[in-house]
């Protein structure tokens, strides 16, 4: 336990009327349900203009000439600006981090200069009084291109015959990482069975329902830029906008209001958004950019475009001897800024085999440039790949030796009493619960009954399958993730709490809200620690002018890090309140507590003075206080994980589905998740994060794929052709929990936002292969489309 | 995206609508429900100079049954088709098919006339019209034309309608006493366009099909009636004759390839649908009829 | 070529007179002219359902409807349905069940759900899923929404057996 000022027998988590661990409705939902939220796409400012980008239709081309003369004459047009025009206002960037050794990338401009490198890259900005007018003008901007050969197949990106996208970099290899631990060759040599497979993943994207939207407002008189953006990391945006616009950070304010979905899509720095900031400065008026859906498909980061060869060695008694992978991923022409497009592959190397005891592991991951849209972190970053490969190999090994999938996992998952320990790849685990979780899952799904049902239905030519997937999940990252590489991305967060003049609480936090419940968890913690009802706790977030400095919400860190900061700040405020109360009541802090919005006797809970009254005295009648006392009704605390680079969580998922072997269609019947994310602040919100995450994983498993043709054209950039999960095809998802708190914080909470996505596709793929077992068909590619399944079944 | 600018005229009558179409020709598009036109315009795939809004033409709405024929006005919305007691009684194939069209909000606006004039080869209603032996009624300056459904659909988004003609109604024979129908489609998600679909209308007596009009959609550039079922009509259906029909179907079809399925898979799915269709039609007969399938 | 048109309609019971360009769609009219930003735009091709409103009592995609087509019509948005109290119980169920996260799909989802509940007193879960299958949600994974709609149906049946 961290040193704390624990008073009495109860910890901060067990206070009277504590909200921690309770299901409470999120505050401020009415606003959203009445359609009275304020999303950036709703925002209007005086003299605001709209920007539309002229985008390259070619995957790779020289920009020969841009003629905007006719466009500039169109009604409502304020300006047409090219890359050169913007270059005087905003500097280019390179998406590399020093701790990813060898990662290289080329400078990227806000608007392309001289050359476009992916279909959809902006070549000019049209600013007009309305979006429609800007689109009309954009249509007649005449751009002369000289098409260049496009690199569109990751498998040949490194061939000598393939053009190098950035000659100054020498080749198309952005990053390579290798790892070789234990004695892999000896392990394989000593294996009784070896299974190999190539796992192929469909490139996909986030499809946030509110597209990316920015309003940039440069106030020339104040020399201050206000950026309204649904970013997950406002301080990061502040730093980068200032850096590239030649401003001090104090001249940049980033405001996040309601965000219509992010999942990592809105945590990155986009060229068109940087262009929008620059245009505001150039044109000295607010500029609004809202990507339309087609633009979103073409320019929101893509993710998970991997081909991963995997190999597993096993003994007949089920012992896994070794894992080996060779992963290839094709990103875009630039490594994304500032988090880099190498992190996903790096995670894959780190995470394969993670749940298991196996010490022999060899991995190679290569990240190659392509003339396709940029690629970067999207919910669960790398985990779905690593989990699908690992769990797919484990199931293949089990099938090879005729062992039940639960049994092989029992034999190989790290024992629950083995902690602290490390994975083969060097990940340090504080405390996980793979076996307890596995057993809980088996009970929840009534595994034996399902196997019985499966067998009975097979007799009637109905093919159902069960698939399970164990996983570990990175949460609460320390500076080990980005900071060490030179990125100005904070790994700490802060919370300031104060009592207002009526004894209610105002709380400012540096974590941000995209719907997961950051506001609620903060209010729950502060209310619990302070003894104040949640209805009297107001949370302010998403404003660099009005919150402490912090990292924001991403990589499942909000609850674990921001929550701990809230807890610690509230503890200090509680002490300060009791100090004043003790002075007023001529008592001592040890004899008092705060409950139900009043200072009470610690012994019998009798109210002594209401917070409302205490606040009145402090703020307006300090003359009535004993001499010498300087009351302080505000406290700020920051928190950063120091001991473990990441707080790993663990879980296991199961999928129960039916494959129509006539049509290849998969019906998802049910899904289960058992998750251990430490202390649960609001169990309902955690479960809902898991469900939402699972469905994104189910989308990856069955539906989602960005389909590029060989010319680098994204051919399904609309909602009718890019298939996202809708309610009709999704199953109910049962969620159970194991609780292994982290000792790094008093709260003990780890993250939970991405766990659902990490393992869902793996469970579904294993279930489909289980269903197809009698046919001898094995598929290691997702999305598992009907065509893929029918092809594997050789039905035509 | 925002639609390109256009001029807008609200037609006050059918003849006024035709006048407007004559005046503007290829530069005009008819706006009925807008559920196909508006997405195309919002994506700037289409940029007509004129929009002729026929939404106010009440005379084009309504469903009536007379002397064994069902008449449906062109502006009848899908939602109204779905709810119609007359359609359920006299053309139950339409009721079943319409439930597959998109989603409730789309069905509340989309019209049968619009759907047929749009002639998307993956859509449900054109194939139903052919299966039901419907007549498409269009009106132009030269007066009214009555076009058999099987001649109306001429290609992808292509019909026998000329630029200055308006589709005003469809007529189809009311389902006879021994008739049966089958509707099936395979779509990736509920409400999506079909990968392959089948609309079939039959006459069933005992364990025999006296008549079978099986029309596929999603397999060609227009609804595709199949001749492969010839061997299944007026004869006992045996596993051998069914197998022959399925093989003949495979040979008859030359489906396109797209992101959902290649030609071979579409052929396969068509065979699956036909087999299910025959089984359903005969099952109903074997159970002694009664009730809708 | 594209002169503004006069339109007259009722929005949430309020009489609205406006002059609109023919190409202006109803979603943009509501959001930009009337500042009723509760109706959201997610795709502009009629697939995501975020723009769902009621027009003459029926749910429609406002991104696929021209403002001009709403002339003479009675339009209801999420703001109106909220203020009238018509969906108060449904919103209550959404709150209790956390059937919304980011809230962007929620107005359209509530309107579509209310449409189902008006026509179906005892919808099964499959039926709820089917009716809502034209409303995209990326956050919840749908189960909480289905639960909330099912619960509201139950509450309404109890109130008015």
Image: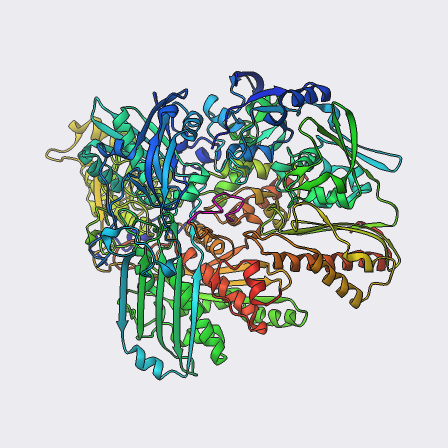
At a point 68% along the width and 51% down the height, the residue shown is B197
Magenta segment, principal secondary structure?
loop
Q: In this view, does A152 lie above or below A463?
A: above
Q: Is B50 positioned to the left or the right of A87 in the image?
A: right
Number of numbered discs visible in the structure rendering:
0
Q: Is B40 positioned to the left or the right of B171 in the image?
A: left
- Rendering quarter of residue B54: top right
Residue C140: percent from left, percent from top: 47, 47
| Residue C133 belongs to magenta span | no
Q: Is A645 positioned to the left or the right of A516 in the image?
A: left
Q: Looking at the rendering, in which quadrant would you find the C terminus of chain C?
A: top right
Evaluate whether residue B55 shows in this view.
yes
At a point 37% along the width and 32% down the height, the residue shown is A289
Residue B7: percent from left, percent from top: 56, 21
At a point 78% along the width and 67% down the height, the residue shown is B239
Instruction: Work out whether residue B176 or residue B166 is closer to the camera in this orientation and state it.
Output: B166
Residue B198: percent from left, percent from top: 71, 51
Evaluate whether residue A474 shows in this view.
no
Instruction: Work out whether residue A466 or residue B108 is closer to the camera in this orientation and state it.
Output: B108
Instruction: Work out whether residue A323 or residue C143 is closer to the camera in this orientation and state it.
Output: A323
Instruction: Work out whether residue A297 or residue A438 is closer to the camera in this orientation and state it.
Output: A297
Residue C85: percent from left, percent from top: 55, 30
Q: In this view, does A172 lie above or below B31?
A: below
Residue at the left extreme, as displayed: A628
Q: In this view, does A302 lie above or below A417?
A: above
Q: What stretch is highlighted in magenta?
A: A712-723
């Amino acid at each position: 336990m961290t040193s704390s000022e624990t008073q009495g027998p109860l910890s901060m988590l067990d206070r009277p009327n504590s909200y921690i661990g309770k299901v409470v409705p999120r505050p401020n939902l009415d606003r959203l349900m009445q359609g009275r939220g304020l999303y950036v796409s709703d925002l209007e400012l005086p003299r605001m203009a709209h920007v539309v980008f002229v985008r390259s239709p070619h995957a790779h081309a020289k920009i020969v000439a841009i003629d905007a003369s006719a466009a500039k004459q169109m009604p409502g047009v304020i300006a047409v600006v090219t890359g050169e025009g913007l270059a005087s206002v905003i500097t280019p960037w390179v998406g590399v981090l020093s701790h990813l050794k060898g990662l290289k990338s080329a400078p990227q401009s806000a608007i392309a200069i001289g050359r476009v490198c992916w279909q959809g890259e902006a070549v000019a900005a049209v600013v007009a009084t309305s979006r429609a007018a800007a689109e009309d003008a954009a249509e007649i901007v005449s751009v002369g291109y000289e098409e260049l050969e496009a690199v569109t197949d990751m498998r040949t990106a490194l061939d000598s015959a393939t053009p190098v996208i950035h000659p100054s970099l020498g080749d198309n290899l952005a990053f390579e990482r290798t790892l070789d631990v234990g004695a892999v060759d000896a392990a394989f040599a000593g294996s009784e069975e070896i299974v190999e497979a190539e796992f192929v993943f469909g490139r996909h994207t986030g499809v946030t329902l509110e597209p990316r939207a920015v309003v940039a407002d440069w106030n020339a008189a104040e020399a201050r830029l206000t950026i309204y953006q649904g970013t997950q990391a406002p301080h990061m945006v502040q730093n980068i906008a200032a850096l590239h616009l030649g401003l001090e950070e104090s001249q940049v304010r980033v405001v996040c209001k309601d965000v219509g979905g992010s999942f990592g899509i809105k945590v990155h720095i986009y060229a068109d958004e940087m262009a929008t900031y620059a245009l505001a400065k150039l044109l000295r008026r607010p500029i609004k950019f809202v990507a339309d859906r087609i633009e979103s498909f073409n320019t929101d980061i893509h993710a998970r475009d991997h081909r991963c060869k995997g190999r597993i060695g096993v003994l007949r008694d089920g012992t896994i001897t070794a894992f080996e992978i060779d992963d290839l991923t094709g990103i875009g022409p630039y490594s994304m800024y500032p988090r880099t497009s190498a992190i996903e592959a790096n995670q894959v190397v780190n995470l394969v085999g993670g749940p298991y005891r196996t010490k022999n592991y060899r991995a190679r991951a290569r990240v190659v440039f392509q003339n396709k849209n940029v690629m970067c972190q999207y919910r669960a970053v790398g985990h779905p790949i690593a989990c699908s490969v690992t769990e797919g190999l484990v199931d293949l090994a089990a099938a090879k030796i005729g062992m039940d999938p639960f049994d092989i996992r029992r034999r190989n998952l790290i024992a629950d009493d083995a902690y602290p320990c490390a994975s083969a790849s060097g990940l340090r685990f504080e405390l996980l619960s793979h076996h307890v979780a596995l057993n809980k899952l088996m009970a929840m799904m009534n595994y034996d009954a399902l196997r019985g049902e499966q067998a009975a239905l097979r007799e009637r030519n109905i093919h159902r399958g069960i698939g399970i997937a164990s996983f570990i999940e990175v949460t609460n990252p320390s500076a080990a993730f980005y900071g060490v590489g030179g990125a100005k991305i904070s790994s700490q967060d802060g919370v300031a709490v104060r009592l207002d003049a009526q004894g209610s609480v105002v709380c400012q936090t540096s974590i941000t809200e995209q719907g997961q419940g950051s506001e609620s968890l903060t209010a729950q913690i502060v209310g619990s620690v302070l003894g104040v009802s949640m209805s009297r706790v107001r949370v302010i977030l998403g404003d660099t002018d009005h919150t402490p400095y912090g990292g924001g919400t991403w990589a499942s860190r909000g609850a674990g890090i921001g929550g701990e900061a809230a807890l610690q700040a509230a503890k200090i405020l509680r002490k300060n309140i009791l100090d004043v109360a003790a002075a007023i009541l001529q008592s001592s802090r040890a004899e008092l507590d705060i409950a139900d919005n009043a200072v009470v006797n610690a012994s019998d809970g009798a109210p002594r003075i209401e917070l409302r009254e205490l606040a009145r005295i402090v703020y307006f009648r300090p003359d009535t206080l004993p001499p010498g006392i300087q009351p302080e009704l505000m406290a700020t605390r920051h928190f950063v994980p120091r001991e473990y680079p990441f707080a790993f969580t663990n879980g296991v998922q199961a999928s129960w589905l039916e494959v129509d072997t006539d049509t290849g269609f998969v019906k998802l019947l049910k899904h289960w998740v058992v998750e251990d994310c430490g202390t649960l602040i609001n169990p309902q919100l955690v479960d809902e994060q898991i469900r939402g995450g699972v469905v994104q994983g189910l989308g990856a498993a069955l539906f989602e794929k960005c389909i590029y043709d060989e010319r680098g054209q994204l051919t399904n950039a609309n909602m009718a052709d890019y298939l996202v999960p809708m309610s009709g095809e999704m199953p109910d998802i049962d969620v159970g929990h194991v609780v292994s708190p982290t000792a790094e914080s008093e709260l003990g909470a780890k993250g939970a936002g991405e766990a659902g996505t990490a393992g869902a596709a793996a469970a579904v793929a294993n279930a489909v292969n289980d269903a197809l077992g009698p046919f001898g068909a094995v598929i290691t590619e997702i999305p598992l489309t009907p065509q893929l399944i029918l092809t594997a079944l050789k039905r035509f | 995206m925002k639609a390109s600018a256009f001029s807008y005229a609200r037609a006050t009558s059918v003849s006024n609508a035709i006048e407007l179409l004559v005046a503007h020709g290829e530069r005009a598009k008819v706006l009925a429900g807008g559920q196909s036109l508006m997405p195309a315009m919002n994506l700037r795939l289409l940029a007509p100079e004129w929009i002729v809004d026929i939404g106010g033409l009440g005379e084009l709405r309504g469903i009536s049954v007379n002397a064994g024929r069902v008449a449906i006005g062109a502006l009848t919305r899908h939602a109204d088709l779905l709810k119609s007691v007359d359609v359920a009684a006299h053309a139950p194939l339409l009721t079943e098919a319409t439930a597959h069209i998109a989603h409730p909000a789309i069905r509340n606006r989309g019209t049968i006339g619009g759907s047929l004039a749009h002639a998307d080869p993956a859509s449900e209603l054109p194939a139903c019209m052919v299966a039901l032996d419907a007549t498409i009624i269009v009106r132009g300056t030269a007066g009214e034309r009555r076009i058999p459904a099987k001649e109306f659909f001429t290609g992808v988004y292509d019909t026998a309608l000329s630029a200055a003609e308006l589709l005003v109604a469809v007529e189809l024979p009311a389902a006879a006493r021994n008739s049966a129908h089958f509707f099936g489609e395979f779509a990736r998600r509920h409400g999506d366009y079909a990968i392959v679909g089948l609309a079939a209308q039959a006459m069933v007596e005992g364990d025999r099909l006296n008549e079978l009009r099986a029309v596929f959609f999603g397999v060609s550039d227009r609804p595709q009636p199949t001749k492969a079922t010839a061997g299944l009509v007026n004869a006992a259906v045996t596993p051998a004759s069914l197998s022959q029909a399925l093989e003949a179907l495979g040979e008859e079809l030359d489906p396109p390839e797209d992101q959902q399925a290649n030609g071979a898979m579409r052929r396969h799915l068509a065979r699956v649908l036909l087999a299910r269709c025959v089984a359903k039609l005969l099952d109903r007969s074997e159970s002694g009829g009664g009730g809708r399938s | 070529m594209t002169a503004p048109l006069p339109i007259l309609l009722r929005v949430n019971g309020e009489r609205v007179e406006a002059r609109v360009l023919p190409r202006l769609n109803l979603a943009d009219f509501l959001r930009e002219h009337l500042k009723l930003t509760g109706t959201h735009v997610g795709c502009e091709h009629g697939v995501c359902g975020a723009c769902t409103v009621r027009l003459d009592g029926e749910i429609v995609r406002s991104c696929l409807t021209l403002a001009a087509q709403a002339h003479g019509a009675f339009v209801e948005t999420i703001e109106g349905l909220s203020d009238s109290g018509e969906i108060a119980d449904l919103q209550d169920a959404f709150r209790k069940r956390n059937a919304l996260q980011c809230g962007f799909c929620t107005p359209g989802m509530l309107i579509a759900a209310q449409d189902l509940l008006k026509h179906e007193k005892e919808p099964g879960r499959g039926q709820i899923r089917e009716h809502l299958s034209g409303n995209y949600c990326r956050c919840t994974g749908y189960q909480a929404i289905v639960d909330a709609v099912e619960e509201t149906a139950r509450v309404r049946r109890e109130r008015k057996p």
